Image: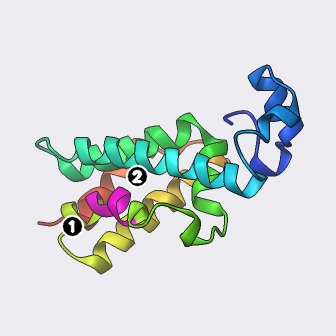
């Protein structure tokens, strides 16, 4: 999805990218909504695995944020789908969102601070994707400052 937004991606286009016809795609997924849920689940599993692994080192907050940023920027279409759509949570595997985001809590030790750190990370990613930060910004320093401000002391 990295070169398309979800809204631009039709089942016909997706089938063509997979080298099959659109009717064949419906043998595997019942609807576009089901496909979106599968994509989001895959994104959450990958992000969660990477974030849980990232916090094992000497600088858990820095590694967490660097990994989050890298994964989000590597596939913007999938990132936006996973974080920007209003999914019915019952379409996702129960507990998956909480598990994938748990490293934010593990790094901060506080639910409110974990939400603040996630909000900072998500906001910075969206601003980078939308080219809303000044070109002269030292983004590495911005990410470091955010992590240091919010990490457990």
Q: Is residue 115 visible?
A: yes
Picture coordinates of residue 31 (x, y %)?
77, 53
In this picture the colour scheme is rainbow
Instruction: Measuring from the top left, give residue 93's x and y in whole percent.
Output: 46, 60
The residues colored magenta run 98-103
**In this picture, residue 45 sits left or right of residue 18:** left
Q: Of the numbered discs in the image, which one, if any, rests on residue 142?
A: 2
Q: Nearer the viewer, residue 6 or 42?
A: 42
Q: Nearer the viewer, mark 1 or mark 2?
A: 1
Q: Quadrant of residue 78?
A: top right
Q: Mark 1: which secondary structure? A: helix
| Residue 99, magenta (yes or no) | yes
- At a point 51% along the width and 44% down the height, the residue shown is 42
Q: Nearer the viewer, residue 78 or 93?
A: 93
In the image, taking residue 29 as reference, residue 144 lies left or right, namely left
From the viewer's perspective, is residue 119 above or below residue 17? below
Binning the other alpha carbons within 10 Å of mark 2 as few (below 14), some (14 to 19) or many (20 upward) gives few
Give 21 or 80, whichever is nearer the viewer.
Answer: 21
Rendered image: mark on residue 108: 1
Kindly identify the residue that appears in the image at 81 percent across and 23 percent down: 20
Q: Residue 35, position in %: x, y?
A: 68, 49
* Residue at 29% over, 57% down: 147
Quadrant placement of the C terminus: bottom left
118 lies above or below 28: below
Which quadrant would residue 119 be assigned to in this image? bottom left
């Amino acid at each position: 999805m990295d070169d398309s937004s979800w809204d631009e991606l039709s089942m016909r286009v997706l089938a063509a990218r997979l080298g099959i016809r659109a009717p064949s795609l419906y043998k595997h997924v019942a609807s576009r909504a089901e496909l979106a849920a599968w994509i989001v689940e895959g994104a959450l599993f990958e992000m969660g695995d990477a974030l849980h692994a990232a916090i094992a080192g000497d600088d858990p907050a820095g590694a967490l944020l660097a990994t989050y940023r890298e994964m989000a920027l590597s596939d913007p279409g999938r990132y936006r789908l996973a974080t920007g759509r209003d999914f019915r949570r019952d379409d996702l595997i129960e507990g998956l969102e909480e598990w994938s985001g748990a490293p934010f809590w593990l790094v901060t030790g506080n639910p409110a601070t974990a939400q603040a750190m996630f909000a900072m990370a998500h906001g910075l990613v969206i601003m980078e994707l939308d080219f809303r930060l000044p070109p002269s910004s030292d983004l590495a320093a911005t990410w470091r400052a955010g992590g240091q401000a919010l990490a457990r002391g």
